[in-house]
Image: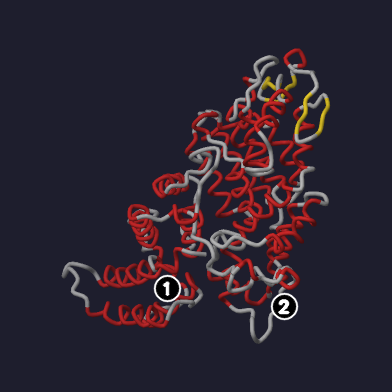
């Protein structure tokens, strides 16, 4: 279908109308793609705001919070940096995704983390990994060209792709290869000779006192010919030469298209070209993302439910919707463990290619793990001294009867957008749950909580909830 879309109308500003109205379904779509899901209050506020003001808010982000920043920095310093503890660093980032005031920027930082996939399994330095995250977060809505130059000199990347081992007379080709193949151009837009020549430009790059340093005595200062250009190139020159290739903006636009619009249906060259031209003129990632998010195409059926939820989106989306206390910094370590089980441990992508995504997220085992985690989150993530999370939420919104609960959870998690047959099945279950035989020693509170938990869990495990 993407090959038949009209580029002239696809990227124009979306304006609600009778044929394509602004409704709760579209609000949920915005929060899934441009954030990490929504609470009931988020959905209602988004509905009132309208599409463009809601996107304005996400692009701008929340007001700075010195207390939040100090709190998260304290956790990072005391738990992760002090002991070089990877799980605590991952928990810190997940906490930021869930509770920070800039979910779109965090979402894009996660996108760039997968693009520049670097794993602490090899780096073995939490400080370097957090530093790389901070670079990607800072440039997430800024200049891709600045980010690419910065990532080339990033200590975590230099260890990950062995730039630190590259010396005059013994150039290491790893970074030059991935710079072209995965970070800027894509396969087919360079040659093996380009890689060999470019590798010599990155010689002499070292880390000293935790920072990038150029050792001129180990730099190969001879002439190099890369992508048709000849000169005494440095590593920074090579990055710039890559950015000047026509393939570079198209490559990045396609990756962001897959992330924000549709991962299964490859777009035509004609559809991509207007954005590629815009992007090449300054490499403004923020402008590119804004164009995509505000477009007719983003709010079309082609984009809607066009991606399988990653484990991060699945887990944080449930936590956001349930307003779960599992989002506290200490319990965020449990989120890290859950995500590792589901196949997405942040700061630990499986290879330099990152996570494949799409269908690879789902198999018999991960689906079972998703169901189990959903049940845990709906039940008692903070221990057994408090009422179940789902029960507390339903009570706060005054939902008591089976029909009220079924409607509430369908609207909260799926904005009511399920097939009629599925909807009927959910409501039938809600009615029948009052007739279930439960242990005689259960209290009235136990019974009430069980009904709510079961119904909430059923909605969260629907096939429709696995996509965004």
Q: Which mark is residue 96?
A: none
The image shows residue 117 at horizontal and vertical percentages of: 57, 40
The local secondary structure at tag 1 comes to: helix
Task: Quadrant for residue 294, please give it.
Answer: bottom right
Measured as percent of width and height from the top left, residue 459 is found at 39, 70
Q: In this view, does 210 lie above or below 353?
A: above
| Circles 2 and 1 in contact, beta carbons < 8 Å | no
In the image as oriented, which residue stretches furthest toward the top? 217
Q: Nearer the viewer, residue 191 or 200?
A: 191
User: Toward which corner of the image does residue 367 lie, by quadrant?
Assistant: bottom left
Single out the residue that lies furthest toward the left.
Answer: 440
Q: In which quarter of the image is the N terminus?
A: bottom right
Q: Does residue 412 appear to the left or right of 230 in the view shown?
A: left
Closer mark to the observer between disc 2 and disc 1:
2
467, above or below 230, in the image: below
Residues packed near mark 2 inside 10 Å, few (<14), some (14 to 19) or many (20 plus):
some
Total count of labels: 2
Q: Which residue is drawn at 35% across and 69% down?
A: 458
Q: What element carries label 2?
A: loop
Q: What is the spatial separation of the Cα atoms under label 2 and label 1, in whole angstroms?
A: 37 Å
Residue in front for this viewpoint, 281 or 86: 281
Residue 135 % position (x, y): 68, 40
Residue drawn at x 79%, y 35% as measured from the top left:
228
Image quarter of residue 10:
bottom right
- Image coordinates of residue 362 in percent, x first then y, are 41, 56
User: Which residue is the site of mark 2?
Assistant: 15
Q: Name the residue under label 1.
A: 395
Disc 1 residue crowd, few under 14, some 14–19, many 20+, Cα 10 Å: few
Q: Specify how the rendered protein is coloured.
A: secondary structure
Considering only order in the chain, which callout, 1 or 2, is on the residue closer to the N terminus? 2
């Amino acid at each position: 279908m993407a090959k038949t879309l009209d580029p002239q109308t696809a990227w124009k500003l979306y304006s609600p109308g009778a044929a394509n109205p602004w409704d709760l379904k579209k609000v949920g779509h915005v929060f899934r793609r441009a954030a990490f899901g929504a609470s009931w209050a988020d959905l209602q506020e988004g509905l009132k705001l309208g599409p463009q003001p809601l996107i304005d808010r996400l692009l701008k982000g929340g007001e700075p919070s010195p207390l939040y920043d100090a709190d998260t920095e304290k956790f990072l310093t005391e738990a992760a940096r002090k002991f070089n503890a990877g799980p605590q660093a991952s928990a810190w980032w997940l906490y930021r995704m869930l509770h920070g005031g800039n979910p779109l920027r965090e979402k894009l930082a996660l996108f760039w983390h997968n693009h520049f996939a670097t794993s602490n399994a090899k780096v073995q330095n939490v400080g370097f990994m957090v530093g790389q995250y901070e670079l990607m977060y800072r440039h997430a809505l800024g200049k891709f060209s600045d980010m690419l130059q910065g990532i080339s000199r990033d200590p975590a990347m230099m260890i990950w792709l062995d730039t630190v081992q590259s010396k005059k007379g013994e150039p290491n080709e790893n970074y030059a290869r991935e710079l072209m193949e995965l970070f800027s151009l894509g396969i087919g837009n360079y040659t093996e000779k380009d890689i060999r020549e470019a590798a010599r430009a990155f010689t002499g790059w070292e880390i000293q006192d935790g920072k990038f340093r150029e050792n001129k005595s180990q730099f190969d200062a001879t002439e190099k010919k890369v992508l048709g250009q000849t000169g005494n190139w440095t590593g920074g020159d090579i990055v710039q030469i890559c950015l000047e290739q026509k393939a570079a903006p198209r490559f990045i636009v396609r990756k962001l298209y897959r992330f924000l619009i549709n991962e299964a249906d490859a777009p035509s060259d004609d559809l991509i070209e207007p954005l590629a031209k815009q992007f090449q003129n300054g490499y403004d990632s923020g402008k590119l993302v804004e164009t995509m998010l505000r477009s007719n195409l983003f709010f079309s059926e082609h984009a809607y439910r066009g991606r399988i939820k990653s484990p991060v989106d699945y887990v944080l989306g449930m936590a956001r919707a349930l307003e779960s206390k599992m989002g506290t910094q200490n319990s965020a370590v449990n989120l890290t463990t859950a995500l590792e089980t589901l196949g997405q441990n942040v700061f630990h992508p499986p290879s330099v290619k990152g996570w494949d995504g799409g269908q690879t997220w789902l198999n018999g085992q991960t689906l079972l793990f998703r169901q189990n985690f959903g049940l845990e989150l709906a039940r008692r993530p903070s221990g057994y001294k408090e009422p179940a999370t789902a029960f507390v939420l339903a009570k706060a919104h005054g939902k008591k009867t089976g029909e009220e609960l079924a409607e509430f959870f369908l609207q909260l998690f799926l904005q009511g957008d399920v097939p009629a047959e599925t909807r009927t099945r959910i409501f039938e279950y809600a009615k029948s749950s009052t007739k279930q035989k439960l242990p005689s020693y259960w209290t009235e509170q136990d019974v009430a909580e069980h009904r709510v938990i079961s119904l909430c869990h059923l909605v969260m495990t629907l096939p429709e909830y696995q996509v965004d």
